[in-house]
Amino acid sequence: MSTPSRSGRAMLVAAAAALAACSPTFNWREVPIGDAGVIALLPCKPERATRDLPIGAGSIPVEMAGCKAGGATFAVAHARAQSTEQAENWLRAWHAATRSQLGDVPVVESPAVLARAASSPAPARLDTQGADAAARAAATHVLWFAHHRPDGSASIYQATVSGAPSSTEAVATFFEGFHIP
């Protein structure tokens, strides 16, 4: 087998560079989250994990899917509550735990609008604020919402973007990309 000539190698390098330039930083894809039919739009192929989230005196099992793209981490966590009341309590505790992890970082908290999300507990959003480059690089954006299930239980979700995505539209695309049946 012969080795490529210098010009052949240059063409291969140029072709590889062209192909790399064509690969998008954000390769958005639909990803099922949990077993309630909710679909998230993630910018890369997610890794999945399950962990216990401390809530009050106990903990709840949480399924997670997440990945890194364009300088940020995109993740969705999901848990199943037995009732709307339990979902409200869990989301309130989840929100408080997330807020306490941010310490003194300035945040803006606001109601969120998400088509077909449960109105109770209502969708909510949290965004860190910072004027300097370090604060923007460590930015956190969180969306909480719930989905009621026909059996009376509720699926609860926390969607998070950590870091400063290279696209200014990435956070909005991620949060607006949820499809709830």
Image (tube, rainbow, N blue to C red):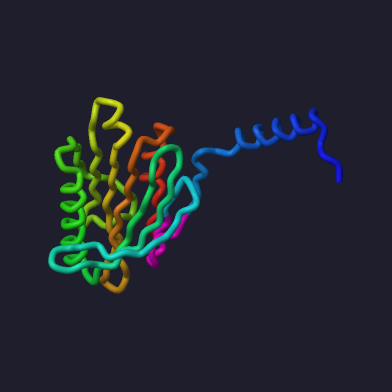
* Residue at the (14%, 64%) spot, across then down: 56
In the rendered image, residue 4, in percent from the top left (x then y), is placed at 81, 36
Image position of 119 with respect to 28: above or below: below
Residue sitting farthest toward the right: 1
Looking at the rendering, which quadrant does residue 116 occupy?
Answer: bottom left
Q: Position of residue 128 (x, y in %)?
A: 24, 37
Q: Residue placed at 80% from the left, 32% from the top?
A: 8
Which residue is nearer to you in this view: 165 or 31? Answer: 165
| Front position in the image: 4 or 27 | 4
Q: Position of residue 148 (x, y in %)?
A: 29, 64
Q: Is residue 129 left or right of residue 33?
A: left
Q: Is residue 60 left or right of residue 48?
A: left
Q: How many marks?
A: 0
Residue farthest bottom in this picture: 151
Q: What residue is drawn where x is 20% and y is 37%? A: 108
Question: Quarter-wise, where is residue 5 in the image?
Answer: top right
Q: Start and end of the magenta stretch?
A: 31-39
Residue 158 to residue 13: above or below: below
